[in-house]
């Protein structure tokens, strides 16, 4: 069975007086993770030259390989070695398009729990059919309104042909869907998306 890669993004606050130590510490963590099966890469950036916020990201092939790394003794030792200059973290996991459907509790404020290498479990994403319905509920009216408007208001739209119609439509609608409409739809449908799944039928 094929599994989706999982990306973990982490926000940490670093003591400004320990920039050199923190840089070495981050690279040491990347080197350790690189030894584990399923590791797909990692990186980090600072929010700004004067900011104490650092953003770190790493990716594993699936849930199991990620768990093996997060529960490892090497990672626990590495996290403990950064306690002197790391204050707290925000951790977020995303798996493909499912990242849009994370419940609010999926974003964790982690202090000692994260440093111990044992963060709280993240609620599962909604079933894929619910994700598909949510995307369709946003994309269908958006595409319909766009098509009606350009057909009525843009001279020479019809003769452009199918290829240019699709190209122009996707270039315009994809950012709207990604940055505005899909977050709005998932927020409105949150109670339905995060409702507990029904168990199968029980024997009579």
Image (cartoon, rainbow, N blue to C red):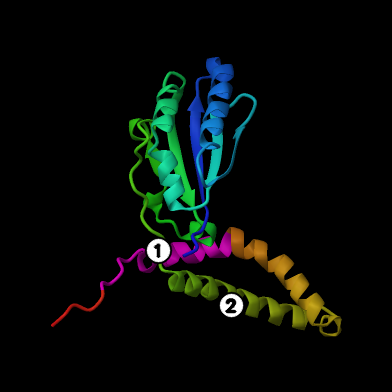
Q: Is residue 161 above or below residue 112?
A: below
Q: Position of residue 77 (x, y in %)?
A: 41, 26
Secondary structure of the residue carrying numbered label 1: helix
Q: Residue furthest top?
A: 17
Question: Is residue 52 something one can see in this rendering?
Answer: no
Q: Position of residue 5 (x, y in %)?
A: 52, 54
Identity of the residue drawn at 61% across and 24% down: 50
Where is the C terminus found, in terms of image quarters?
bottom left
Give me the C-alpha separation between circle 1 and circle 2: 19 Å
Question: Is residue 127 something one can see in this rendering?
Answer: yes
Q: Is residue 29 left or right of residue 194?
A: right
The verdict on residue 181 being magenta is yes
Q: Residues within 10 Å of mark 1 (few under 14, many from 20)?
A: some
Does label 1 or label 2 sit earlier along the sequence?
Answer: 2
Q: Position of residue 30 (x, y in %)?
A: 55, 33
The prevailing secondary structure element of the residues shown in magenta is helix
Q: Which residues are magenta?
A: 180-199
Q: Which label belongs to residue 190?
A: 1
Q: Which label belongs to residue 49?
A: none
Q: Is residue 187 above or below residue 200?
A: above
The verdict on residue 106 being magenta is no
Identity of the residue drawn at 18% across and 77% down: 202
Q: Is residue 54 above or below residue 63?
A: above
Q: Residues within 10 Å of mark 2 (few under 14, many from 20)?
A: few
Identity of the residue drawn at 49% across and 32% down: 12
Please name whichever residue, 66 or 125, is drawn nearer the observer in this view of the structure: 66
Please name whichever residue, 57 or 88, is drawn nearer the observer in this view of the structure: 57
Q: Check disc 2 and report the residue beneath it.
A: 141
């Amino acid at each position: 069975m094929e599994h989706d890669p999982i990306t973990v993004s982490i926000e940490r606050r670093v003591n400004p007086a320990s920039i050199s130590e923190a840089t070495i510490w981050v690279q040491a963590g990347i080197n350790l993770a690189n030894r584990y099966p399923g590791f797909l890469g990692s990186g980090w950036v600072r929010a700004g030259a004067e900011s104490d916020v650092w953003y770190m990201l790493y990716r594993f092939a699936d849930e199991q390989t990620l768990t093996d790394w997060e529960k490892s003794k090497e990672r626990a030792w590495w996290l403990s070695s950064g306690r002197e200059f790391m204050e707290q973290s925000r951790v977020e996991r995303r798996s493909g398009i499912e990242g849009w459907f994370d419940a609010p509790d999926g974003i964790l404020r982690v202090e000692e729990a994260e440093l111990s290498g044992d963060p709280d479990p993240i609620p599962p994403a909604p079933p894929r059919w619910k994700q598909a319905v949510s995307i369709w509920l946003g994309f269908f009216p958006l595409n319909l309104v766009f098509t009606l408007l350009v057909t009525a208001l843009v001279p020479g739209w019809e003769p452009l042909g199918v290829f240019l119609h699709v190209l122009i439509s996707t270039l315009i609608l994809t950012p709207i869907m990604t940055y505005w409409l899909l977050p709005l739809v998932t927020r409105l449908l949150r109670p339905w998306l995060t409702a507990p799944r029904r168990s199968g039928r029980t024997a009579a």
